[in-house]
Image: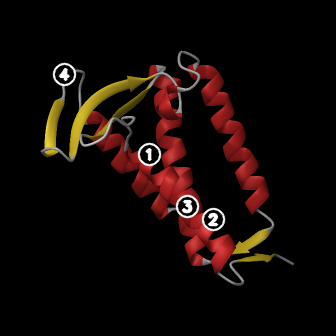
Amino acid sequence: MYWTAILVFLLDRLSKMAVGPQTHFSLLPGVIGITYAANTGMAFSLFSGRPWLLGALSLALLAAGYFFLRPYRLSRLSRTAAMLVLGGAAGNLLDRFVQGYVVDMIAFEFVDFAVFNVADTAIVCGVTLLACSLLFESGAWERKE
């Protein structure tokens, strides 16, 4: 069950180690590129310059998620989604506490949008899958006895 979280965490770490402050190139010209960015905030650089506050908030949200999900027997899709969120959160949390910022590197070149990373992608996909499982998967969230 935790393999998904571990895989996301490792992919996030490897991708962040592969880029440095001078990194900037196109993977698909005009579509997507790799551009190093040190983000001291959260999504869209909100709360910039407060890594310990964001780290504490991240830990609190992870704990709340754990206690919220704990009384449920989740479907495979829901468990996978939760592990995507856990792996992504752990990757960004490590950056915040060790470096004081999160390394972002994935940039859409065809639109002016925030630079993001593998962890961010996993979190967004995980939350989306959790919402879908709640809305469309019958029996995905059964209470444990």
Is 136 in front, or is 69?
A: 136
Decide: few, some or many residues near mark 2? Use Cα within 10 Å; few <14, some 14-19, many ≥20.
some
Decide: few, some or many residues near mark 3? Use Cα within 10 Å; few <14, some 14-19, many ≥20.
some
Relative to 2, residue 136 above or below:
below
Inspect this view and state whether residue 1 appears: no
What's the CA distance linking mark 4 and mark 2?
A: 38 Å
Q: Amino acid at mark 3?
A: Thr
- For disc 3, the marked residue is 128
What's the CA distance linking mark 4 and mark 1?
A: 21 Å
Pointer 3 with pointer 2, Cβ within 8 A: yes
Q: Amino acid at mark 4?
A: Gln
Is 93 in front, or is 47?
A: 47
Label 3: element kind: helix
Q: Nearer the viewer, mark 1 or mark 2?
A: 2
> Which quadrant of the rendered structure holds the N terminus?
bottom right
Pointer 1 with pointer 3, Cβ within 8 A: no
Q: Nearer the viewer, mark 3 or mark 4?
A: 3
Image coordinates for residue 51, horizontal then vertical, percent: 56, 21
Relative to 126, residue 46 above or below:
above
- For disc 4, the marked residue is 22
| Residue 82 falls in image quadrant | bottom right
Considering every residue shown, the one lying at the far top of the view is 49
- For disc 1, the marked residue is 119
- For disc 2, the marked residue is 131
Inspect this view and state whether residue 91 appears: yes
What's the CA distance linking mark 1 and mark 3?
A: 14 Å
| Residue 128 falls in image quadrant | bottom right
